[in-house]
């Protein structure tokens, strides 16, 4: 049996503060296969972003282990692409110099970098904007720059934390469609954190529901809608409705629980 | 400025309204320049008129006498001789002070523990009026140019150091994490994130400190020197030669304004990525 893309084994995360200890994640285990598109949903503070950050190696875990592509994650994980809601495009670099940044870090020669940047600009429909500074672009365009930057060094695994959360509803659909296309064409493994159930179902092949504090995996729903999907039309399919029902039934008491606190 | 999705950066020709708007901006700019010039002319004219009529020229000199003095210095080479030494000391002091300040600012910003330990000492050092150190520097480095460099460097150092330090601490951690995952080494993060991000702060520090560097040098020259604009002013004061005092002050004012103008242009270029 081939090694899974990501294997999360009994991962625990406790935050120790002044006079109290908070359990963010309680013995979470999950296996994500290569090429899967997995969405994490759950109430705020359930630890879904924490888990994502642990796969990225930004946050250390209290106990347990995460194995990514056969290697245990112990420090910053440079074999993943990482995209968050926050604007991580460097404002002092032009679009093309932002996209070539990861290649620069990896010592790719400049002619090859240029070629790659051109390809990436085409991939995210930003041709002609290479010389622009991020401030000259709209929020959606900056997001696409971040996407291109992340894809430039070809990580097989993409970790995304509410990447389209700050975008308006229409733009969100456009970005989702673009992401699905890239995922299929380039055979990525994607872990996608969102609080938008519809987004999770429209994109993912598997949706994982987290319970409120302490964060545990409560329920997993397989989404049987075949790819390629149309992120807009998918909403009117019966499978979508069924999945939404199941997920909402599991998720809503958790959200109510969170509100009571 | 934000551009809508799909709209390319400045593609189509501007409309009439846009052209009118821009012409209005230009007109206003021209008006400001004209008024600035008029104010300067008026001031000089009043000074010239008042000198000898309202106040004894012995105290306030007069524009004609001052410009005459500067003209004489220009012809006999005194201006270049003294100004060059002052500018040289200022520039070297500025370079040394800002280089050390920048390096230490980065270091302290990176090592929070070190910064916390040394914080009270830095605050104490910062509170010393740096000009009080001038006599000490003269003892250490002699009355030559070295002591003036030391005075201006010590002033510039603190401004740049504190600004760099704040700049490093203000770096958005999102950029650091994102670039680390993209494969940046420690040095890579420093080069591509921390230093550019701190630039805005550092530039502000540099802009504030250039006039200080000039002040430091001139004060040093006041105390003991045999060359420099500060020396001229001090010597002329001793001789009650107000023409030369005013000429020296005017030269410093013009030099300061020119340096500031250059820095503003540099700042605009370095920070062109900001809105």
Image (cartoon, coloured by chain):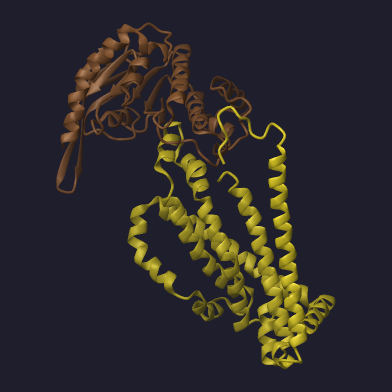
Chain colours: A brown, B yellow
Horizontal side of residue A85 vs B243, given as left or right:
left
Tally the marks: 0
Where is residue B45 shown, x and y percent of the image?
77, 79
In this view, the residue in front, B223 or B233, is: B233
Q: Give the x, y percent position of residue A254.
A: 19, 27
Position of residue B263 relative to residue A199, above or below, is below
Q: Is residue A213 left or right of residue B80?
A: left
Q: Is residue A126 above or below residue A32?
A: below
**Residue A131: quadrant of the picture:** top right
Q: Position of residue B215 (x, y in %)?
A: 59, 73
Q: Nearer the viewer, residue A56 or A159?
A: A159
| Residue occupying image coordinates x 41% and y 55% | B108
- In this picture, residue B18 sits left or right of residue B131: right
Q: Nearer the viewer, residue A199 or A58?
A: A199
**Residue that lies at the very extreme toward the right in this rendered image:** B75
Q: Please identify the residue farthest to the front as the structure is shown.
A: B17
Residue A94 is at least partly visible in this image: yes
Which quadrant of the figure contains the C terminus of chain B?
Answer: top right
Quarter where residue A46 is shown: top left
Q: Is residue A53 or residue A131 the one in the foreground?
A: A131
Is residue A78 among the parts visible in the rendering?
no
Give the percent coordinates (x, y) of residue B187. Answer: 48, 42
**A217 relative to B60, above or below:** above
Residue at the image position 30 percent from the left and 14 percent from the top? A206
Q: Quadrant of the N terminus of chain B?
A: top right
Residue for point 36% across, 63% down: B119
């Amino acid at each position: 049996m081939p090694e899974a893309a990501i294997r999360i084994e009994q991962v625990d995360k406790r935050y120790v503060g002044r006079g109290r200890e908070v359990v963010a994640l309680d013995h979470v285990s999950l296996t994500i296969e290569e090429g899967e598109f997995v969405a994490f949903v759950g109430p705020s503070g359930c630890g879904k972003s924490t888990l994502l950050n642990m796969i990225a190696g930004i946050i250390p875990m209290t106990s347990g282990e995460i194995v990514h592509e056969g290697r245990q994650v112990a420090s910053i994980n440079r074999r993943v692409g990482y995209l968050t809601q926050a604007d991580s495009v460097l404002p002092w670099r032009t679009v093309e110099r932002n996209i070539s940044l990861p290649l620069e870090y990896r010592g790719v020669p400049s002619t090859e970098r240029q070629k790659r940047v051109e390809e990436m600009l085409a991939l995210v429909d930003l041709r002609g904007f290479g010389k622009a500074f991020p401030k000259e672009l709209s929020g959606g365009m900056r997001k696409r720059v971040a996407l291109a930057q992340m894809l430039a060094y070809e990580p097989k695994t993409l970790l995304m934390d509410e990447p389209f959360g700050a975008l308006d509803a229409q733009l969100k659909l456009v970005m989702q469609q673009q992401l699905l296309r890239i995922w299929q064409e380039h055979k990525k493994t994607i872990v996608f954190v969102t609080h938008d159930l519809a987004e999770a179902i429209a994109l993912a092949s598997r949706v994982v529901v987290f319970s409120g504090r302490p964060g545990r995996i409560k329920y997993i729903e397989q989404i049987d809608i075949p790819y390629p999907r149309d992120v807009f039309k998918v909403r009117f399919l019966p499978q979508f409705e069924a999945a939404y029902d199941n997920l909402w039934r599991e998720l809503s008491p958790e959200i109510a629980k969170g509100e009571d606190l | 400025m934000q551009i809508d999705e799909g709209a390319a950066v400045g593609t189509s020709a501007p409309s009439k309204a846009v052209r009118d708007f821009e012409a209005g901006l230009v007109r206003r700019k021209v008006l400001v320049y004209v008024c600035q010039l008029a104010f300067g002319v008026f001031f000089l004219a009043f000074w010239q008129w008042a000198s000898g009529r309202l106040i004894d020229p012995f105290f306030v000199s007069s524009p004609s006498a001052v410009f005459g003095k500067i003209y004489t210095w220009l012809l006999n080479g005194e201006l270049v001789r003294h100004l060059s030494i002052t500018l040289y000391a200022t520039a070297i002091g500025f370079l040394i002070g800002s280089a050390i300040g920048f390096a230490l600012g980065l270091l302290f910003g990176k090592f929070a523990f070190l910064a916390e330990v040394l914080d009270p000492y830095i605050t104490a050092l910062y509170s010393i009026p740096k000009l009080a150190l001038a006599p000490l520097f003269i003892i250490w480095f002699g009355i030559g140019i070295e002591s003036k460099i030391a005075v201006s460097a010590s002033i510039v150092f603190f401004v740049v150091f504190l600004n760099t330090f704040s700049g490093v601490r203000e770096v958005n951690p999102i950029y650091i994490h994102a670039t680390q995952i993209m494969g940046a080494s420690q040095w890579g993060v420093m080069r591509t994130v921390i230093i550019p991000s701190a630039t805005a702060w550092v530039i502000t520090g540099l802009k504030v400190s250039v006039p200080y560097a000039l002040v430091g040098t001139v004060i040093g020259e006041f105390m003991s020197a045999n060359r420099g604009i500060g020396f001229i002013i001090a010597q002329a004061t001793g001789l009650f030669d107000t023409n030369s005092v005013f000429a020296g002050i005017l030269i410093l004012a013009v030099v300061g304004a020119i340096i500031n103008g250059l820095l503003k242009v540099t700042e605009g270029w370095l920070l062109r990525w900001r809105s």
